[in-house]
Image (spheres, rainbow, N blue to C red):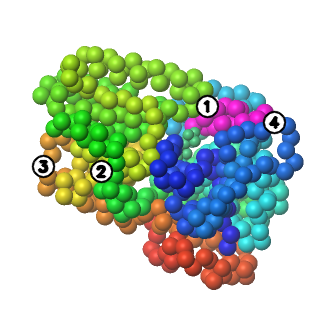
């Protein structure tokens, strides 16, 4: 089988480059090992009508990375307009932030159609397509229009909200109906999957049975595949990263002080404002924690052309400065606030340095920072994870200290509690979480999805063996294929 993976953002195989976004960083190692072709945006745009979409192709592990220049006339409407000013706010239950136009929607559809045309170049008789995330909800339908009959799967990295919120997205019916061209749609959590299912049943009035929707496109299976990380590799990297110059400088600067860490894209879904209010409250309620505990908040700028993001950047900067002004001392800065990205390897060392990881989004599909913080800890003296109950990761990491990010006093109390937690309890919580992270890795996630994609098409098509996708066609060297047959985490409805 030839696998083609599609996402808007892609990553090149360089471990020490800063990366924006969980999806690209998470996919990189598994795509590298799988031998797949990974197709995405080059980050550049090109003018004029392109008969043959321009792609820069380079080797990536045992496969390849193809980066496309997207059409200049439609890029803004697609990325900032519809994907990130209509879909993103709705998917994170912030309909109040939807700002979009008919032109944005048309550009979004144009870019989906453009990507479909570009993908035809990578199509072989035994190709399976795996589309990632909300940028390409309609890509499956565009591929079908071009005559593709091979398996096409879709995985949503964000939450899927309640029907009333989805209904706030212009053209929601048309879009979600188009999504049913996928053979398999994967979600991070059961809640997301159930929300989608209810929309399909109640708004589209389509029959759903045992997690399978019947539509004019045929059958679409809905299932849950919580994304994981390579916890063991991350742990090894974190132990090594302690000697990285950035990490050593941080440790030296602490001078016995304890550290809490937050690492997020500057996005309104991440709960940065609420988190800073909680620290403010903590230092007010527990004056002994002033001077002895500081927060390192890394907030990587993101989607800067969108008004809501510009406003957030200003609001957070103002708040940090206010808190530092009120609680700071001549030789102590309560919040170290950085607006830049770091490589995965440096982040691993920073996580290991911090006694508390604060991951408190208002809403998040999974949040891999939570998983990475746990994996980076020293098993003999682990830090404590304070985790929002509204992050998908809370379903698995249930021995973290779970908080409601809207409850400032509650968060302040829990962060203070994390700082005084005895070693035995820290170890017990850490070990329980590590067990889960090691059982449900990113490699399992990848293999489980591909297996389910093959099965979902075979439910209404000839068996896979008849299509030439036999076991020996799988790259033997790839760990993901060796996992075939292993018990996966996918929960079929
Ligand atoms: O959750 C969806 C997601 O794709 C994340 O994986 C990533 O953090 C983010 O969105 C990427 O956003 P952008 O590509 O706009 O920076």
Residue 242's disc number: 2
Estimate the spatial distance between the alpha carbons at disc 2 and disc 1, rounded to whole Å.
Answer: 39 Å
Residue 26 location, x and y as percent? 50, 54
Estimate the spatial distance between the alpha carbons at disc 1 and disc 4, rounded to whole Å.
Answer: 23 Å
Is residue 473 visible in the rendered image? The answer is yes
Estimate the spatial distance between the alpha carbons at disc 4 and disc 3, rounded to whole Å.
Answer: 60 Å
Camera-side mark, 1 or 4: 4
User: At x 22% / y 25%, what residue is drawn?
Assistant: 332
Q: Earlier in the sequence, mark 2 or mark 1?
A: 1
User: At x 62% / y 77%, what residue is drawn?
Assistant: 474
**In the image, is residue 473 above or below residue 10?**
below
CB-based contact (under 8 Å), mark 3 and mark 1: no
Residue 64 location, x and y as percent? 65, 61
Estimate the spatial distance between the alpha carbons at disc 4 and disc 2, rounded to whole Å.
Answer: 46 Å
Residue that numbered label 1 is attached to: 85
Q: Which secondary structure type mostly characterizes the magenta part of the structure? A: helix
């Amino acid at each position: 089988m030839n696998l083609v993976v599609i996402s808007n953002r892609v990553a090149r195989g360089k471990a020490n480059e800063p990366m924006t976004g969980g999806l690209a960083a998470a996919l990189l190692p598994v795509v590298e090992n799988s031998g797949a072709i990974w197709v995405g945006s080059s980050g550049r745009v090109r003018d004029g009508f392109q008969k043959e979409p321009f792609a820069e192709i380079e080797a990536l592990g045992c496969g390849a990375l193809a980066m496309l220049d997207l059409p200049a006339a439609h890029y803004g409407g697609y990325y900032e307009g519809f994907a990130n000013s209509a879909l993103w706010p709705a998917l994170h239950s912030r309909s109040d932030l939807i700002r979009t136009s008919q032109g944005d929607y048309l550009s979004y559809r144009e870019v989906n159609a453009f990507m479909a045309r570009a993908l035809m170049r990578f199509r072989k008789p035994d190709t399976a397509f795996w589309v990632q995330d909300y940028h390409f909800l309609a890509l499956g339908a565009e591929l079908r229009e071009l005559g593709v009959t091979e398996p096409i799967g879709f995985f949503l990295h964000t939450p899927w909200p309640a029907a009333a919120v989805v209904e706030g997205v212009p053209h929601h019916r048309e879009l979600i109906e188009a999504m049913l061209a996928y053979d398999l749609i994967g979600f991070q959590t059961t809640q997301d999957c159930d929300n989608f299912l209810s929309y399909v049943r109640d708004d589209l009035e389509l029959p759903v049975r045992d997690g399978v929707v019947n539509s004019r496109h045929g059958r679409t299976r809905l299932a849950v595949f919580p994304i994981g990380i390579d916890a063991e590799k991350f742990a090894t990297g974190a132990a090594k990263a302690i000697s990285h110059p950035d990490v050593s400088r941080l440790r030296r600067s602490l001078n016995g002080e304890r550290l809490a860490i937050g690492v997020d894209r500057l996005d309104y879904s991440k709960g940065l404002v609420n988190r800073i209010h909680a620290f403010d409250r903590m230092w007010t309620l527990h004056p002994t924690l002033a001077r002895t505990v500081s927060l390192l908040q890394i907030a990587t700028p993101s989607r800067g052309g969108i008004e809501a993001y510009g406003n957030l950047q200003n609001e957070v900067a103002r708040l940090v400065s206010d808190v530092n002004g009120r609680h700071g001392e001549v030789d102590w800065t309560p919040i170290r606030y950085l607006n830049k990205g770091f490589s995965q390897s440096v982040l691993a060392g920073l996580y290991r340095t911090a006694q508390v990881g604060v991951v408190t989004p208002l809403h998040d599909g999974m949040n891999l920072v939570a998983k990475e913080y746990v994996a980076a800890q020293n098993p003999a003296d682990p830090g404590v994870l304070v985790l929002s109950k509204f992050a998908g990761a809370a379903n698995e990491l249930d021995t973290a200290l779970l908080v409601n990010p809207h409850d400032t006093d509650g968060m302040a109390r829990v962060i203070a509690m994390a700082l005084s937690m005895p070693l035995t309890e820290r170890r017990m919580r850490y070990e329980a979480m590590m067990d889960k992270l090691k059982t449900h890795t990113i490699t399992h996630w990848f293999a489980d999805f591909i297996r389910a994609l093959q099965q979902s098409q075979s439910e209404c098509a000839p068996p896979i063996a008849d299509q030439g996708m036999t076991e020996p066609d799988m790259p033997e060297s790839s760990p993901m294929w060796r996992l075939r047959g292993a018990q996966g985490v996918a929960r079929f409805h």
